[in-house]
């Protein structure tokens, strides 16, 4: 919903070994000569038959070798057990002093980075290889279809540089999501890792997020989507760009919002404003996909990184109906937890809630329900509003015609209203 401007309140070269001549310095030669003289004197000393430290006794040569062999066996066994312990434990506690040592801080991560699944320990390199195979199997590249009889031999080839975007399958019957925005009058094809070409039979664009859905008529393997509750700052992720290159990164914020002026604090119930923030620039990887190390689809990079869970309701709607019909509530709002400094008695003692910013849309669902400017929404469908409440996402999870119940605080008095959601034009 458009905002009303009148509203207020380094790599070294390899050297071939055969081409290298090693010469000893004069100093090194002198040291070797002195060492040889010393060794000769020691040898002559012990060959003196009249010299003896003690009376010769029985030979212990065999016993010495046995000790050496046992030492080697015990050493190898101990080293193996210690290595296994390090690879399968994140920390160790020293007895008596009760001090914990984080093994990842003293042992290279490559040696301790393991995944244990079904009693099988898998090194990180193997895990990443499996992940990449899975990503390639469930994604496709998107091209404009090449049609016409006069296309030359080379022009018939779908070249990598002609890739428009990359799509991820989200259903078994061939629906996929991409950050590329289709032209409805243009024909497209998608090509999988086996270079199988499939025509696109249906296209649905979502102008709010900038994402698009399209369908091919084939049974496919598809991705599970990650959930908001499973995301944490610093979590590792991989970006698959439209040329199918893999980039490893981290998620700095699962949900973020660019706020450069106070007006940016205003949200819309019918818009989309919170994005995923990566440790790499999203603009460096346009038309890309974001995955977790568990292989789940986490997001899509259009102009910004759109979290997959933010459009889960849209995905389900497209799969079931073949289209998008976004519900509408029709109001703008401020989050109290993001607005410190309010001096009005109506808000200054509140720590959470959504302040209705300006009058709701004329004849919209919120206005019809009796919601007014400066009302504070404290509960939605019985759930208390807190810093994690995303009204736009709650609206999106419903369909046009459904009720949304809200508890309103107005001048110290609470009341409950029901708004019948409309449909965005």
Image: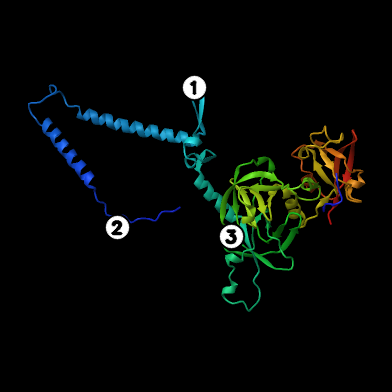
Marks 2 & 1, CB-CB < 8 Å contact: no
Name the disc covering residue 243, or none: 3
Neighbor class of circle 1 (other Cα within 10 Å; few <14, some 14-19, many 20+) is few
Q: For numbered disc 2, what is the local secondary structure? A: helix
Instruction: Please tell me which of labels 1 and 3 falls first in the chain.
Output: 1
Instruction: Please tell me which of labels 2 and 1 falls first in the chain.
Output: 2
Marks 3 & 2, CB-CB < 8 Å contact: no
409 up-or-down from 164: above or below: above
- In the rendered image, which quarter is residue 152 located in? bottom right
Q: Position of residue 331 (x, y in %)?
A: 85, 47
Residue corresponding to mark 2? 19
| x 55%, y 52%: residue | 132
Q: Looking at this rendering, what residue extends furthest in the bottom direction?
A: 150
Instruction: Please tell me which of labels 3 and 2 falls first in the chain.
Output: 2
Q: CA distance from mark 1 to mark 3?
A: 54 Å
Residue corresponding to mark 1? 97
Q: In the image, which is nearer the foreground, mark 3 or mark 2?
A: 2
Q: CA distance from mark 2 to mark 1?
A: 56 Å
Name the disc covering residue 192, or none: none
Residue 10 visible to an observer of this rendering = yes
Q: Position of residue 3 (x, y in %)?
A: 83, 52
- 15 sits left or right of 41 in the view: right
Q: For numbered disc 3, what is the local secondary structure? A: loop
Neighbor class of circle 3 (other Cα within 10 Å; few <14, some 14-19, many 20+) is some
Q: Position of residue 337 (x, y in %)?
A: 77, 37
Q: Position of residue 399 (x, y in %)?
A: 82, 49
On the rendered image, what quadrant is the C terminus found in? bottom right
Neighbor class of circle 2 (other Cα within 10 Å; few <14, some 14-19, many 20+) is few
Residue 224 visible to an observer of this rendering = no
């Amino acid at each position: 919903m458009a905002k009303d401007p009148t509203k207020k309140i380094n790599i070294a070269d390899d050297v071939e070994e055969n081409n290298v001549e090693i010469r000893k310095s004069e100093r090194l030669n002198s040291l070797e000569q002195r060492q040889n003289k010393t060794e000769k004197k020691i040898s002559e000393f012990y060959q003196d038959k009249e010299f003896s430290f003690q009376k010769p006794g029985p030979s212990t040569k065999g016993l010495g070798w046995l000790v050496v062999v046992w030492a080697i066996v015990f050493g190898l066994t101990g080293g193996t057990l210690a290595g296994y312990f390090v690879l399968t434990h994140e920390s160790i506690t020293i007895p008596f002093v009760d001090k914990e040592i984080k093994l990842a801080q003293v042992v290279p991560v490559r040696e301790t980075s393991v995944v244990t699944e079904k009693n099988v320990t898998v090194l990180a390199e193997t895990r990443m290889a499996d992940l990449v195979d899975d990503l390639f199997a469930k994604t496709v590249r998107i091209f404009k279809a090449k049609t016409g009889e006069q296309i030359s031999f080379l022009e018939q080839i779908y070249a990598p540089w002609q890739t428009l975007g990359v799509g991820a399958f989200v259903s078994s019957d061939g629906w996929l999501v991409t950050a590329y925005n289709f032209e409805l009058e243009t024909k497209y094809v998608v090509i999988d890792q086996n270079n199988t070409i499939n025509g696109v039979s249906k296209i649905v664009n979502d102008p709010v997020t900038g994402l698009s859905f399209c369908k091919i008529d084939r049974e496919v393997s598809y991705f599970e989507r990650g959930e908001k509750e499973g995301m944490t700052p610093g979590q590792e992720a991989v970006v698959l760009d439209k040329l199918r290159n893999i980039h490893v990164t981290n998620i700095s914020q699962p949900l973020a919002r660019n706020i450069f002026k106070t007006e940016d604090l205003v949200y819309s119930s019918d818009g989309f404003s919170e994005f995923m923030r990566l440790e790499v620039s999203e603009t460096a990887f346009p038309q890309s996909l974001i995955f977790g190390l568990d292989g789940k689809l986490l997001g899509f990079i259009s102009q910004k990184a759109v979290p997959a869970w933010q459009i889960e309701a849209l995905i389900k709607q497209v799969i079931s109906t073949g289209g998008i019909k976004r519900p509408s509530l029709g109001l703008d709002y401020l989050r109290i937890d993001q607005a410190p400094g309010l001096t009005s008695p109506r808000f200054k003692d509140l720590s959470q809630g959504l302040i209705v910013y300006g009058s709701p849309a004329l004849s919209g669902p919120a206005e019809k329900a009796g919601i007014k400017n400066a009302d504070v929404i404290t509960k939605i469908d019985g759930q208390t509003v807190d810093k994690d409440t995303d009204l736009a996402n709650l609206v999106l999870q419903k369909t046009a015609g459904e009720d949304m119940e809200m508890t309103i605080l107005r001048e110290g008095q609470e009341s409950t209203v029901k708004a019948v959601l409309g449909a965005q034009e």
